[in-house]
Image (cartoon, rainbow, N blue to C red):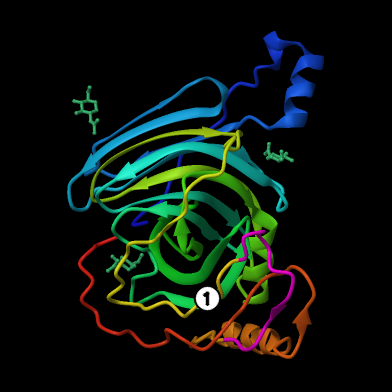
Amino acid sequence: MKSSILFTAFAAVSSVTAGVIEARATLARRALPNSVQAWTNDYADVNFTTGANGVFNVNWNNPPGGNGVHGRGYNRPANDIVVNYTGTFKTSGAAYLALYGWTRNPLVEYYVIESMGNHNPSDNVSATQYGCLQSDGGTYEVWEKKRTNAASIDGDHTNFEQYWSVRTTMHTGGTITLANHIAAWKNAGLLLGTQQYLDIAVESQQGAGSAVITVGTAPSTALPNTPTPTRRTARAAGTCPRSSTTGLSSTTKVTTTTKASTTTTTVATTTTAAAVTTTTVATTPVLTTFASSTSPVSATATTSV
Ligand SMILES: *[C@@H]1O[C@H](CO)[C@@H](O)[C@H](O)[C@H]1NC(C)=O
Ligand SMILES: *[C@@H]1O[C@H](CO)[C@@H](O)[C@H](O)[C@H]1NC(C)=O
Ligand SMILES: *[C@@H]1O[C@H](CO)[C@@H](O)[C@H](O)[C@H]1NC(C)=O
């Protein structure tokens, strides 16, 4: 995103009226969100409301340059949180539906992108792909991009990295096993710091759309998965193995690493990652890396975010 959040509020926990025992029983089944995010830049036209039981509703109609991030989620999440959500997400423009979070030390903005409009965030000359992972019945590409002098939870002029897992088939609703993504990122040398918060969020960019999402509840039926319609112009993706219908692959061979960087720190990380290239991993972490997408095909992307 062009700039970042920066507003996390905490919803009241309903156990005050529900009674302690009943609240505990509910939490055992599912954790209601306890954080709300609502941020827009000066150009955005976004309306956002929250409802009972983890619901949020967002409608947007953004001109070029508009940007907003709205959602609900969890404050200080555990790295092994399993996030459930269900709902609808519709857009003809550029927007993402994602699990979206921040860590500090290092400062990292991360996304697990579940659906998108007509722009894939990896379609950017500054993005680097590290491979693929399989989780929760889908295949995700792992991408990274550095941000400099950009807005973050620590101010408007900060340096940080963005990590993305980008689902190769889109769906709206499901379960996100964050630990699988963190393990894959770690294998690629993409380390998180201390968790601040995460949300199921809509990043609305250029164009119109609407979403109604319930955070904390998984869909009760199987959902359609549709291939990303994105035609990438600035960055092509490496070929990912197809996901199995049962979810996680049981065996993933880590073949190579592609971290292309100019910094001493990152080179050291690359060396570490390369050391595992001969290892066959029995179960998770699930990362397949490969040499690809290190040179831009062209720089003709038209979307600005
Ligand atoms: C998501 O659903 C799974 C399976 O029911 C459950 O174990 C997990 O606690 C849920 N996650 C949250 C944050 O409620
Ligand atoms: C947001 O609400 C305002 C006030 O009702 C309305 O004028 C505007 O068109 C709405 N924008 C969107 C994108 O729904
Ligand atoms: C690429 O990413 C940078 C940094 O986030 C952003 O400023 C730029 O607009 C993006 N370019 C495209 C074509 O999306």
- For the point 61% across and 34% down, the residue is 216
Is residue 156 in view from this perspective?
no
The amino acid beneath tag 1 is Cys
Q: Main secondary structure of the magenta part?
A: loop
- For the point 74% across and 91% down, the residue is 278
Q: Is residue 282 above or below residue 119?
A: below
User: In the rendering, at what x and y percent does residue 207 appear?
Assistant: 22, 47
The magenta segment is: 244-257
- In terms of depth relative to the viewer, which is nearer, 167 or 129? 167
- In terms of depth relative to the viewer, which is nearer, 123 or 10? 123
Is residue 246 located in the magenta-colored stretch of the structure? Answer: yes
Which residue position is annotated with label 1? 240
Q: Is residue 190 above or below residue 51?
A: below
Q: Quadrant of the N terminus?
A: bottom left
Instruction: Judge left or right: residue 298 versus residue 169.
Output: left
Q: Which quadrant holds residue 255?
A: bottom right
Ligand 1's quadrant: top right
- For the point 56% across and 75% down, the residue is 241
